[in-house]
Image (cartoon, rainbow, N blue to C red):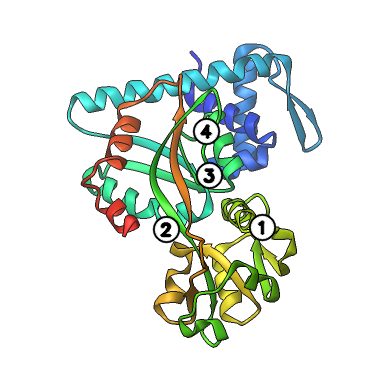
Amino acid sequence: MINLHELNVFVEAALAQNFSVAARRLYLSQPAVSLHIANLEKQLGMALFHRNGRSIQLSDAGRVLLPMAQDALRQGKQIEETMSSLKGVMIGELAIACSTTVGKYILPRIVAGFRACHPQVRVTINVTSRRSALDWLLTGRAEIAVVSAKVQHAELSSQPFTEDRIILIVAADHPWADGRTVQSADLLGEPFIARENTAGTYEVLTEALAVHNVDIGQLQTVLTLANAEAIEMSVEAGIGVAFVSKLAASRGLALRRVVEVPVAGMNLTREIDMVRRRRSMVTPLQQTFWDYVFDPANEALRFIAG
């Protein structure tokens, strides 16, 4: 009989296309991953990978096996969680993929509250880009994704659950830190710290500036960073001004190291969506977590909204 653990090792190796990467994700040694794959190949009587030094590629048999293996793992997980739920105990593992701000500031509070109710549940949060988070969901490596963009995909279903405010911040000794409201055109004369152009913050700002007839390319960008905390610290250091998530700027704002500056006619928000696969089997654990997130009594969401 096929071993589900070996199937899981095969799936991770197939998705990573690298035994060493799969080993790190599974907390195994690389030789252990190779051994599990070899055992599975021996049992099935065919090679699942083409090996060329450190490079691996799925064989034809491996490509056929991959979706079936993923389904088998999901079914095994559903059986275990369903049988446990019949005894009134919620167990299992829940993998969530999310974009950076959401992962660092929103999900930990939600997960902490959920695990207080279900302490035997293990939750893994993979913080990555929005595109990668959705890829994790589509390939079955995550059951839920949380992203800051409206999802348009035939295989995915999304539901908004909160909003994130994007604000302009300046250093505490900047002339704009005196409580004034600035105009969008004023931004053109300031050194600007930007997010990478694939970030949700960048997209929201681009659209908002366009409404005011300002092209984001006109800003005097002196530094581009892929991390909101690094941007906030760069603003503290006086390198430039920046638009960031208010959640990410909360520490600097509280310590008065940075100051929020209103921009006339600009109220920037981005929708945060919870996403899952449409046609995938939903386990009791996944549904319970989903219901918890959208429970109006959820204390974590009240904190976020506030």
Residue pointed to by mark 3: 27
Q: Which amino acid does label 3 sit on?
A: Tyr
Q: What residue type is labelled 2?
A: Tyr
Residue pointed to by mark 4: 137
Indicate which disc, 4 or 2, sits on the residue closer to the N terminus: 2
SS type, badge 2: helix
Residue under the point 47% across and 18% down: 72
Along the viewing direction, whichever of 119 and 143 lies nearer the viewer = 143
Residue pointed to by mark 2: 105
Label 3 CA crowd tier, 10 Å (few <14, some 14–19, many 20+)? few
SS type, badge 1: loop
Rounded to the nearest angstrom, the CA distance separating label 3 from label 2 is 26 Å
Image height check: is 205 above or below 2? below
Q: Please identify the quadrant where the C terminus is shown.
A: bottom left
Rounded to the nearest angstrom, the CA distance separating label 1 from label 2 is 33 Å
- Quadrant of the image occupied by residue 282: top left
Indicate which disc, 1 or 2, sits on the residue closer to the N terminus: 2
Along the viewing direction, whichever of 232 and 62 lies nearer the viewer = 232
Residue pointed to by mark 1: 213
Rounded to the nearest angstrom, the CA distance separating label 4 from label 3 is 21 Å
